[in-house]
Amino acid sequence: MSKAIKTKGSLERRDVQLTFGETNTLSTSYGPFGYSASATDGVRIDTGNTDLEGMGVAVRCSTGITASGSPTATTVSVKLSGSADSGSNWSVIGEWTADVSALGTSAEALVFPIPRGYGDLPLLKLEAKVTFTGGTTPAVTAGKLYGWIDAYGAE
Protein backbone atom coordinates (compact mmCIF):
# COMPACT_ATOMS: atom_id res chain seq x y z
CA MET A 1 0.00 0.00 0.00
CA SER A 2 1.45 3.37 -1.00
CA LYS A 3 1.24 6.47 1.12
CA ALA A 4 -0.24 9.70 -0.17
CA ILE A 5 2.27 12.44 -0.84
CA LYS A 6 1.47 15.75 0.77
CA THR A 7 2.59 18.93 -0.92
CA LYS A 8 2.73 22.43 0.44
CA GLY A 9 0.50 24.97 -1.25
CA SER A 10 -0.45 28.58 -0.94
CA LEU A 11 -3.86 30.19 -0.69
CA GLU A 12 -2.56 32.77 -3.18
CA ARG A 13 -1.91 30.10 -5.80
CA ARG A 14 -4.20 30.21 -8.82
CA ASP A 15 -4.77 27.59 -11.46
CA VAL A 16 -3.60 29.12 -14.75
CA GLN A 17 -6.67 27.64 -16.44
CA LEU A 18 -8.84 29.90 -14.28
CA THR A 19 -6.95 33.11 -15.11
CA PHE A 20 -8.46 35.78 -17.36
CA GLY A 21 -5.17 37.70 -17.36
CA GLU A 22 -4.58 41.43 -17.60
CA THR A 23 -6.54 44.13 -19.39
CA ASN A 24 -5.01 46.49 -21.87
CA THR A 25 -4.94 50.09 -20.54
CA LEU A 26 -8.48 50.68 -19.34
CA SER A 27 -10.85 53.03 -21.16
CA THR A 28 -14.38 54.39 -20.75
CA SER A 29 -15.70 51.52 -22.88
CA TYR A 30 -15.68 47.87 -21.84
CA GLY A 31 -12.47 46.08 -22.82
CA PRO A 32 -11.59 42.42 -22.22
CA PHE A 33 -9.14 40.89 -19.79
CA GLY A 34 -6.36 38.85 -21.37
CA TYR A 35 -5.27 40.99 -24.28
CA SER A 36 -2.57 39.50 -26.48
CA ALA A 37 -1.47 39.89 -30.07
CA SER A 38 -3.45 36.80 -31.08
CA ALA A 39 -6.52 37.33 -28.87
CA THR A 40 -7.67 40.93 -29.09
CA ASP A 41 -11.10 39.89 -27.85
CA GLY A 42 -9.62 38.65 -24.58
CA VAL A 43 -9.20 35.35 -22.79
CA ARG A 44 -12.19 33.07 -22.54
CA ILE A 45 -12.33 30.39 -19.87
CA ASP A 46 -14.06 27.17 -20.86
CA THR A 47 -15.41 25.65 -17.66
CA GLY A 48 -16.86 22.60 -19.39
CA ASN A 49 -19.22 20.92 -16.95
CA THR A 50 -17.67 22.58 -13.90
CA ASP A 51 -20.18 24.40 -11.71
CA LEU A 52 -18.70 27.74 -10.62
CA GLU A 53 -21.80 28.93 -8.78
CA GLY A 54 -20.82 30.32 -5.40
CA MET A 55 -17.21 30.95 -6.43
CA GLY A 56 -15.94 34.45 -7.16
CA VAL A 57 -14.26 36.65 -9.74
CA ALA A 58 -11.15 38.24 -8.24
CA VAL A 59 -9.78 41.50 -9.63
CA ARG A 60 -6.56 43.24 -8.66
CA CYS A 61 -5.04 46.46 -9.99
CA SER A 62 -1.73 45.67 -11.71
CA THR A 63 -1.01 49.21 -12.93
CA GLY A 64 -2.38 52.19 -11.01
CA ILE A 65 -5.35 53.95 -12.59
CA THR A 66 -4.70 57.61 -13.35
CA ALA A 67 -6.60 60.18 -15.38
CA SER A 68 -6.18 63.56 -17.01
CA GLY A 69 -8.82 66.24 -16.56
CA SER A 70 -8.91 65.92 -12.73
CA PRO A 71 -12.13 63.93 -12.20
CA THR A 72 -13.68 64.25 -8.74
CA ALA A 73 -14.57 60.54 -8.64
CA THR A 74 -13.57 57.49 -10.64
CA THR A 75 -15.13 54.04 -10.56
CA VAL A 76 -14.30 50.78 -12.30
CA SER A 77 -17.01 48.47 -13.61
CA VAL A 78 -16.32 44.77 -14.11
CA LYS A 79 -18.66 42.56 -16.15
CA LEU A 80 -18.70 38.74 -16.30
CA SER A 81 -20.50 37.22 -19.28
CA GLY A 82 -21.18 33.64 -20.31
CA SER A 83 -21.92 31.86 -23.56
CA ALA A 84 -23.46 28.46 -24.30
CA ASP A 85 -22.66 28.56 -28.02
CA SER A 86 -18.88 29.04 -28.38
CA GLY A 87 -19.07 32.81 -28.08
CA SER A 88 -21.71 33.72 -30.65
CA ASN A 89 -24.13 35.04 -28.01
CA TRP A 90 -23.19 36.39 -24.57
CA SER A 91 -25.35 36.82 -21.46
CA VAL A 92 -24.25 39.02 -18.56
CA ILE A 93 -23.87 36.88 -15.42
CA GLY A 94 -22.74 39.62 -13.08
CA GLU A 95 -21.75 43.28 -13.15
CA TRP A 96 -20.00 45.07 -10.30
CA THR A 97 -18.70 48.58 -9.63
CA ALA A 98 -15.91 49.60 -7.26
CA ASP A 99 -14.27 52.88 -6.36
CA VAL A 100 -10.78 53.14 -7.89
CA SER A 101 -9.27 53.71 -4.43
CA ALA A 102 -10.41 50.18 -3.46
CA LEU A 103 -8.36 48.82 -6.37
CA GLY A 104 -5.02 50.49 -5.62
CA THR A 105 -1.94 48.48 -6.60
CA SER A 106 -1.21 47.76 -2.92
CA ALA A 107 -4.83 46.83 -2.14
CA GLU A 108 -6.08 43.30 -1.70
CA ALA A 109 -7.93 41.79 -4.64
CA LEU A 110 -11.64 42.51 -4.75
CA VAL A 111 -13.71 39.34 -5.07
CA PHE A 112 -17.16 39.53 -6.63
CA PRO A 113 -19.50 36.54 -6.18
CA ILE A 114 -20.54 34.51 -9.22
CA PRO A 115 -24.30 34.41 -8.72
CA ARG A 116 -26.13 31.15 -8.28
CA GLY A 117 -28.44 30.12 -11.08
CA TYR A 118 -26.47 31.72 -13.91
CA GLY A 119 -27.44 28.85 -16.19
CA ASP A 120 -25.58 26.54 -18.49
CA LEU A 121 -22.98 29.01 -19.78
CA PRO A 122 -19.63 27.16 -19.80
CA LEU A 123 -17.65 29.82 -21.72
CA LEU A 124 -16.80 32.89 -19.61
CA LYS A 125 -15.25 36.28 -20.40
CA LEU A 126 -14.43 39.24 -18.16
CA GLU A 127 -14.46 42.92 -19.17
CA ALA A 128 -13.80 46.24 -17.40
CA LYS A 129 -14.22 49.97 -17.94
CA VAL A 130 -13.67 53.24 -16.07
CA THR A 131 -16.34 55.86 -15.32
CA PHE A 132 -15.45 59.44 -14.40
CA THR A 133 -17.43 62.05 -12.48
CA GLY A 134 -16.50 65.71 -12.66
CA GLY A 135 -13.35 67.25 -14.06
CA THR A 136 -12.69 68.69 -17.49
CA THR A 137 -13.00 65.98 -20.18
CA PRO A 138 -11.16 63.35 -18.11
CA ALA A 139 -9.45 60.46 -19.86
CA VAL A 140 -7.56 57.39 -18.63
CA THR A 141 -3.80 57.93 -18.79
CA ALA A 142 -2.80 54.61 -17.16
CA GLY A 143 -4.40 51.63 -15.48
CA LYS A 144 -4.63 47.87 -15.91
CA LEU A 145 -6.47 45.16 -14.00
CA TYR A 146 -5.73 41.45 -13.58
CA GLY A 147 -8.56 38.94 -13.09
CA TRP A 148 -9.08 35.28 -12.21
CA ILE A 149 -11.67 32.86 -10.81
CA ASP A 150 -11.36 32.54 -7.03
CA ALA A 151 -12.43 29.02 -6.09
CA TYR A 152 -12.86 30.10 -2.46
CA GLY A 153 -15.61 32.50 -3.48
CA ALA A 154 -16.64 35.81 -2.03
CA GLU A 155 -17.94 36.63 1.42
Image (tube, rainbow, N blue to C red):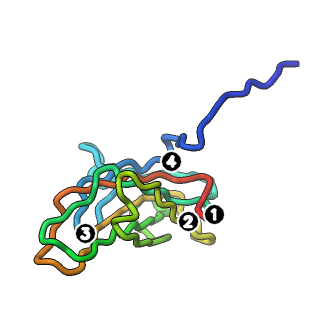
| Mark 2 element type | loop
Label 4: state its secondary structure. Answer: helix
Cβ atoms at labels 2 and 1 below 8 Å apart: yes
From the viewer's perspective, tell me whether residue 27 is left or right of residue 122: left
Q: Which residue does the numbered mark 1 point to in the structure image?
A: 54
For label 3, the residue is: 29
Q: What residue type is labelled 2?
A: Ile
Which of marks 4 and 3 precedes in the sequence? 4
- The residue carrying mark 4 is 18
- The answer for how far apart the CA atoms under marks 2 and 1 are is 6 Å
The residue shown at (30%, 48%) is 39
Q: In the rendered structure, are the residues bearing label 2 and label 4 in contact, judged by CB atoms less than 8 Å apart?
A: no
The percent position of residue 135, horizontal first and vertical second, equals 15, 78
Quadrant (top left, top right, bottom left, bottom right) of the N terminus: top right
**Along the polypeptide, which appears first: circle 2 or circle 3?**
3
Q: Where is residue 111 in the image (x, y as percent from the top left)?
A: 51, 61
Amino acid type of the residue that numbered disc 3 sits on in the rendered structure: Ser
> Residue at the spot x=23%, y=69% of the render?
28
